[in-house]
Image (spheres, coloured by chain):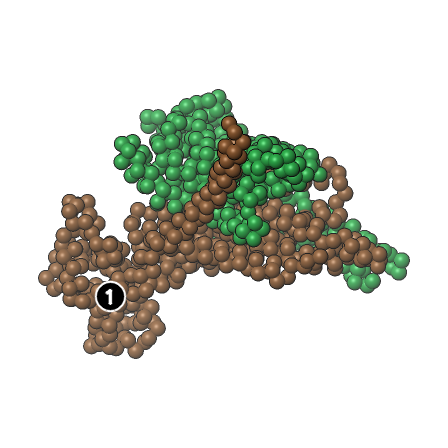
Amino acid sequence: MPNYHGLYSLLWSQLIPLLLLLIFIVIDASVKELLIFERLPESIILIGQDEINYSVNVIRDNIRNLDVLISLDILSIESANGLYNQYFLYRTLFLSIISLLSGALGFFAISRLNMRFDARRNVEKILRFIFFIFSTVAVLTTFGIILSLIFETLRFFSQVGFTEFMFGTHWSPQTAIREDQVGSSGSFGAIPIFTGTLLITFLAMIVAAPLGLYSAIYLSQYAKPSVRNYFKPMLEILAGIPTVVYGFFAALSVGPFIRSSGETLGLTVSTESALAAGLVMGIMIIPYVSSLSDDVMSAVPESLRDGSLALGATKSETIKKVIFPAALPGIVGAMLLAISRAIGETMIVVMAAGLAANLTANPLSAVTTVTVQIVTLLVGDQEFDSPKTLAAFALGLVLFFITLILNVIAMITVRRYRERYE
Amino acid sequence: MNDKALTLKRKFAETRFKIYGLASLFLAMVMLVVIISSMTYRSIPAFTNYGINLEIKLANEFIDKDDLDYRGIIRETIFSLDSECDDRKCRRSFSKLFSSGAAYDLRDALEEDESLYEKNFNFYILFSDDADLFYKFGIDKNLPENERRLNDQEILWLEGFQEKGLVEKKFSSNLFTNGDSREPEIAGVLGAVIGSMYTILITLIISFPTGVLAAIYLESFASKNRITDFIEVNINNLAAVPSIVFGLLGLALFINFFGMPRSAPLVGGCVLSLMTLPVIIIATRASLQSVPPSIREAALAMGASEMQVVFQHILPAALPGILTGTIIGLARAFGESAPLLLIGMVAFVVDIPQSVMDPATALPVQVYIWADSPERAFVAKTSAATLVLIFLLIIINLAAVILRKKYELKW
């Protein structure tokens, strides 16, 4: 099989060099920065961080062109020359080492080839290893999420106390621009945010749990297959509509509607009420509840159902007394997944719930949620060392762990349930 | 209670229960219809625009084609409507009625047809959003003047135009052909759609090969051990991580650590591909599993290696399912906006992005930006943009359905 021999030498000669090339591309920017920083004149460093960043950016963008580099007047002519030479020396060295390595590895591979060499097995070994690397990307992503969140959160807690964040009841992250201004510290008590998130999630589940569950019961137990085939995808469209559309709908139609109907009843309703966001989010979550509940109820063994019906129970009695209890763990799993989805949902609350961190359980007032705060703290201009931006990462970490725990519990319950009837 | 009454009661309970189920299904459907129809209804004004047909007099004038003051020409033309208006305040208020995009329209028209430089011709000048809304919905004149978008004099002018029969309503294609703008009457979604396309392209390039190869490894080669179990748990969990957390990862890792540019579709694509990856892996595994073991055994019996079995027999058979799953994953990424907000794709971008490194925004983010705009005319534009978004999603999902129907193998 000559093509395997070719493939074998190709993989040997290209794989490691390609990896090195990737590393080169990734580190190139930081190497440039390091080289530039070494040569930055004292006068610029003294001016301050903004000026340094600006100069480094300008030099980095023009590092390939010596004439421009000199005409920029940031570096002296010698250091511009030195920078240019050193940068290109490093580039050339790195790239030539890569190509030399590629040639050497190729020669090595070819020298191993002969009549008896089992190229196919060797090639497959290499490919299998590559595939394994690809399958670890998901793990790397999880680690990336945890590490980056924890790293920034630790920086946050070096500036703001842990107990203040977890148990404080006052949230106003706007740190003042001038240091001598009143209230310049900002306060980071996250309790109002957590209660706001809980309130909206609760409202959403009040809508989604009964509607989703009853829809699932109807679809899995009553509907004819033709009806089921038609309505199940229809229901899933609700999950396919982008959340930004729901958010716009909530802010434009539902919010004002609740406000005006509240006013006719003599209630004061804020335009960005928790109720509007919760209701619309509930609609969005219906398919998450119904789809999985439908699956688990369909998975209840026929024998249980037949036994109950044979004893004279009506269909609804069978569902209530036999199928529902049997499917309960799975249904609980579905609810937990739906709750986790509601907690992590962003656009609906960003557009329809408010920014005011009120500590209240009144669904007609404005509350704010974890996701809303993350977005508000991070959208727009930001400096990376202020507790304001770092607070977003701390909130993100809380969000990640809460949803993680919910997901894991849900997955375990559903899996246990499946195993019981297999 | 006698038997008959009990039976009746049970029957009644049965019907009631069934009705509950039907009613909740029906309610969910009604909400779907309400959302779509309310968006459609509110978007109607976005597709038309009022304007005024005026004669532009370029004949008998000396014209320097390279340095033509288009804005000046438009101004001169509109002030010919009311010659009494000659002080500064009046002129400012008068020109506020017309779209500032008219100068660009004129430039485009002249560049298209060079012969226009030498003659007088009729030109359609768009009204600004306030004037446009006046013709579409009228205005409440009982409000005090300073609380209205238009003052008494402006309303008088607009009514005057209408009486003279100058006002004309036309279909407006700006929504589909323009980038974003501060002026609602010339703002469009083209830039956002292109930005979305670039983002999805990057997502596809990264997540499709990675996801498929990872799934093949886990399904066909991996031995059952702790490491593969761990990977599997990770993938399942990653599929349920809130999307905004991926945005935080993108911000911390790609932008702060790797120094990639903010607002670029490249970064957006990277973030969304991490989000789409678990979806593709799960779909691919399901699809690989559905290929019957007999195929695999037959190929192995003929002397094929494991790798050959997978790539020459199982993968081709599973491909329709894999592609369907990928398209559905991409459709989800297409409608996603929360992570993109965090990596700066929420910027005000007028130009249509030319590459994956240009600052850009995505269509769902455009909806969010417009929904936040104070101008009333943006309500219709936003609704229209959500319709475009839903329409594109329907097309993408339709492609997946057709693919499945046409190529799916039944064993």
Residue B300 lies, in percent from the top left, at 82, 55
Question: For the C terminus of chain A, which image quadrant?
Answer: top right
Above or below, B121 against B368 in this view is below
Question: For the N terminus of chain A, which image quadrant?
Answer: bottom right
Q: Locate residue B249: give its quadrant.
A: top right
Chain to which mark 1 belongs: B
Say what secondary structure mark 1 lies in. strand
Residue B99 lies, in percent from the top left, at 26, 59
Above or below, A191 against A141 in this view is above
Amino acid found under the numbered disc labelled 1 = Glu
Above or below, B103 against A145 in this view is below
Horizontal side of A375 relative to A236 (left or right) equals: left
Horizontal side of B298 relative to B324 (left or right) equals: right
Judging by colour alone, the chain drawn in brown in this rendered image is: B
Which residue is denoted by mark 1 in the rendering?
B168
Q: Residue at x 57, y 60 (%)?
A: B402
**Callout 1 crowding tier (Cα within 10 Å): few <14, some 14–19, many ≥20:** some
Judging by colour alone, the chain drawn in green in this rendered image is: A
For this orientation, the residue located farthest to the left is B84
Q: Locate residue A189: give its quadrant.
A: top left
